[in-house]
């Protein structure tokens, strides 16, 4: 019985890091939908900041800790915690284990490719494929940065 459970869990991990089977494209669409509070199909800088530092920042200290991020992301988008961990470290550009305005503002030019201060689904999709550990077509493999 133990062997079967062990094999099953190894099989699940090797199939992909998202137990619900979401692709990075699907996660991008879900994130955009969640962040787009005025429903115009795009994320503005204000929406991005508002969402991140209200819903994700559980203890309201104006930054999103590693624990807060992994908790929220795994719960909402069902990525594997290891994938989410590597994803967080890709987003945490100054490597202080917190997502702050500094990190967000450093990613905005990369997200907003045409620099109109709004991030469309296609722009966000490209960005997520760049920074998400599963975004390069090797589902399930985690490549933490800085290890
Ligand atoms: Ca919007
Ligand atoms: Ca940081
Ligand atoms: Ca744009």
Image (tube, helix red, strand yellow):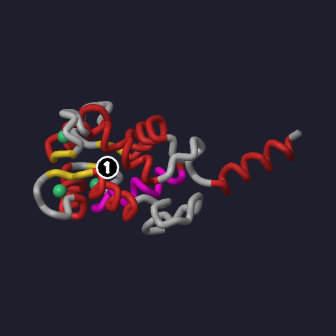
Q: Main secondary structure of the magenta part?
A: helix
Q: Residue tagged by mark 1? A: 98
Q: Which residues are magenta?
A: 82-95
Taking the spot 29% from the left edge, 62% from the top edge, the residue there is: 93
Taking the spot 42% from the left edge, 58% from the top edge, the residue there is: 132
Q: Is mark 1 within 8 Å of ligand 2?
A: yes
The reply to whether residue 35 is in sight is: yes
Compared to residue 117, the image places residue 73 above or below, namely: above
Q: Is residue 124 left or right of residue 68?
A: left
Taking the spot 66% from the left edge, 52% from the top edge, the residue there is: 13
**Nearer to me, 60 or 140:** 140
Q: Quadrant of residue 60?
A: top left
Compared to residue 58, the image places residue 110 above or below, namely: below
State the residue lying farthest toward the left.
116
Taking the spot 42% from the left edge, 56% from the top edge, the residue there is: 87
x then y, percent, for residue 105: 18, 56
x then y, percent, for residue 28: 38, 49
**Nearer to me, 36 or 101:** 36
**Nearer to me, 77 or 69:** 77
Would you say residue 90 sits in the magenta stretch? yes
x then y, percent, for residue 73: 43, 41
């Amino acid at each position: 019985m133990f062997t079967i459970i062990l094999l099953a869990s190894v099989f699940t991990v090797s199939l992909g890091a998202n137990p619900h089977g979401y692709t990075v494209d699907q996660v991008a669409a879900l994130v955009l939908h969640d962040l787009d509070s005025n429903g115009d199909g795009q994320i503005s800088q204000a929406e991005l900041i508002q969402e991140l530092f209200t819903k994700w920042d559980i203890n309201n200290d104006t930054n999103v800790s590693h624990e807060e991020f992994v908790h929220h992301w795994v719960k909402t988008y069902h990525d594997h915690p290891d994938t989410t961990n590597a994803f967080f470290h890709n987003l945490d550009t100054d490597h202080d284990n917190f997502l702050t305005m500094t990190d967000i503002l450093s990613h905005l030019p990369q997200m907003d490719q045409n620099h109109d201060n709004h991030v469309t689904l296609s722009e966000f999709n490209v960005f997520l494929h760049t920074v998400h550990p599963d975004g390069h077509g090797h589902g399930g493999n985690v490549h933490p940065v800085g290890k």
